[in-house]
Image: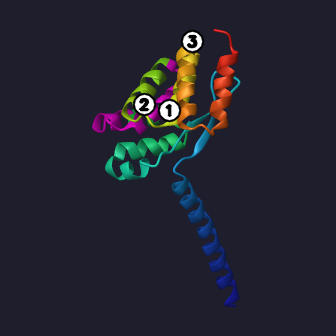
């Protein structure tokens, strides 16, 4: 009779351990990558979804927390509104502008994506993924020269990233 509650307890503990371990791994890695198809481009782009400083800022800004939750659920229109509110309170947060850039890319609003990603890069020029995303937006707007320059910067910051290398080769192969 006592064996059934013990088995149930062990199964619950096992399930909890799996969920906790998965959350720990994601937190440790510091980022999650999402596949996004951009317009008529055949290349799939990886866009940054989580950055290490996000965990610290979550406690400081409730609007940012709400925006992050909506962003993870791919509710981009609602997330955009919350990120804009968060930017009013924390205008020096490059993650907000990077997320807005990804949202605008998803919406094929390339002009706003360029503006948001440029601001994120201005605030924190050390993120390869921002240059990579900016390269996509610039290419979609027809500015191939700037797209190539930003793809080179992304590759320079992360030289082992095959996705960045492939994208730069693809840009160079297309005629101006």
Residue 151 colored in magenta in the image: no
Secondary element type, mark 3: loop
Circle 2 crowding by C-alpha within 10 Å: few under 14, some 14–19, many from 20:
many
Q: Nearer the viewer, mark 3 or mark 2?
A: 2
- The quadrant of the picture occupied by the N terminus is bottom right
According to the image, label 2 marks what residue?
121
**Is 27 rendered above or below residue 124?**
below
Residue 120 falls in which quadrant of the image?
top left
Region of the chain picked out in magenta, as a range:
84-110
Mark 1 is surrounded, within 10 Å at the Cα level, by few (under 14), some (14 to 19) or many (20 or more) other residues, namely many
The reply to whether the C-beta atoms of the residues labelled 3 and 2 are less than 8 Å apart is: no
Compare marks 3 and 1 and give the one earlier in the sequence: 1
Mark 3 neighbour density, 10 Å: few (under 14) some (14–19) many (20 or more)? few
Main SS of the magenta part reads helix
Q: Check disc 1 and report its element: helix, strand or loop.
A: helix
Specify which label sits upstream in the sequence, 3 or 2. Answer: 2
Q: Residue 43's spot in the image, x, y percent?
A: 69, 27
Spatial distance from mark 1 to mark 2, Cα to Cα?
7 Å
Mark 1–mark 2 CB contact (< 8 Å): yes
Residue 142: which disc?
Answer: 3
Residue behind mark 1: 130
Point 42% across, 47% down: residue: 54
| Label whose residue precedes the other's in the sequence (1 or 2) | 2
Name the residue at 65% across, 19% down: 171
Q: Is residue 137 visible?
A: no
């Amino acid at each position: 009779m006592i064996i059934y509650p013990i088995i149930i307890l062990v199964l619950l503990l096992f399930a909890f351990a799996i969920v906790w371990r998965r959350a720990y791994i994601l937190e440790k890695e510091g980022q999650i990558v999402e596949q996004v198809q951009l317009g008529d481009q055949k290349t799939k782009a990886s866009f940054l979804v989580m950055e290490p400083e996000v965990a610290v800022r979550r406690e400081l800004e409730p609007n940012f927390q709400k925006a992050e939750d909506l962003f993870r659920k791919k509710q981009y229109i609602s997330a955009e509104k919350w990120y804009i509110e968060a930017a009013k309170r924390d205008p020096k947060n490059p993650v907000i502008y990077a997320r807005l850039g990804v949202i605008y890319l998803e919406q094929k609003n390339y002009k706003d994506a360029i503006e948001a990603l440029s601001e994120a890069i201005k605030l924190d020029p050390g993120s390869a993924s921002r240059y990579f995303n900016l390269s996509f937006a610039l290419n979609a707007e027809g500015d191939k020269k700037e797209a190539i320059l930003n793809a080179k910067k992304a590759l320079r910051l992360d030289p082992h990233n095959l996705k960045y290398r492939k994208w730069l080769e693809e840009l160079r192969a297309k005629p101006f």
